[in-house]
Image (cartoon, rainbow, N blue to C red):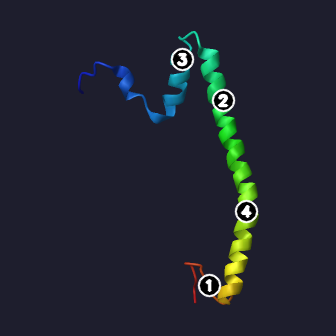
């Protein structure tokens, strides 16, 4: 086992966020840091959901247009995809 001068450098990914939260409590701007973190987290989530809500209908229209233009719409009606078939 090697001699590690910084034992904190071996912190795993599971413990990274709690480690950062505990370290940030030492600073006088802890509340500001945590408020900014939560604000960014929630803002990113809301923007992602809104993007999906507005882009899904456009995607469906583009796909429908391409299917109509190319005259191709394949379905696998008689295809068995199970890998456990006993036929």
Residue in view at x 68 percent, y 43 percent: 45
How far is disc 2 from disc 1 in space, using C-alphas?
A: 47 Å
Mark 2 lies on a secondary structure that is helix
Residue 56 is marked as 4
How far is disc 4 from disc 3 in space, using C-alphas?
A: 40 Å
Mark 4 lies on a secondary structure that is helix
How far is disc 2 from disc 3 in space, using C-alphas?
A: 14 Å
Residue 24 is marked as 3
Residue 7 is marked as none
* Mark 2 or mark 3: whose residue is earlier in sequence: 3
**Mark closer to the observer (1, 3):** 3
How far is disc 1 from disc 4 in space, using C-alphas?
A: 30 Å
* Mark 1 or mark 3: whose residue is earlier in sequence: 3
Residue 79 percent coordinates (x, y) = 62, 87
Mark 3 lies on a secondary structure that is helix
Residue 43 percent coordinates (x, y) = 69, 38
Classify 50 as above or below 72. Answer: above
* Mark 4 or mark 2: whose residue is earlier in sequence: 2
**Mark closer to the observer (2, 1):** 2
Task: Quarter of the image for the C terminus: give it.
Answer: bottom right
The residue nearer to you, when weighing 64 against 78, is: 64
Residue 38 is marked as 2
Classify 23 as above or below 85. Answer: above
Marks 4,3: beta carbons within 8 A: no
Residue in view at x 51 percent, y 23 percent: 20
Neighbour tally class for label 3: few under 14, some 14-19, many 20 plus, Cα within 10 Å: some
Task: Quarter of the image for the N terminus: give it.
Answer: top left
**Mark closer to the observer (1, 4):** 4
Classify 5 as above or below 51. Answer: above
Neighbour tally class for label 4: few under 14, some 14-19, many 20 plus, Cα within 10 Å: few
Reading the image, the residue beneath label 1 is 80
């Amino acid at each position: 086992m090697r001699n590690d001068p910084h034992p904190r450098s071996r912190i795993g990914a599971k413990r990274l966020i709690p480690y950062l939260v505990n370290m940030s409590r030492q600073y006088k701007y802890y509340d500001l840091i945590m408020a900014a973190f939560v604000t960014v987290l929630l803002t990113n989530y809301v923007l992602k959901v809104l993007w999906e809500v507005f882009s899904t209908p456009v995607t469906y229209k583009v796909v429908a247009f391409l299917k109509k233009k190319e005259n191709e719409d394949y379905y696998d009606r008689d295809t068995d995809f199970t890998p456990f078939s006993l036929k």
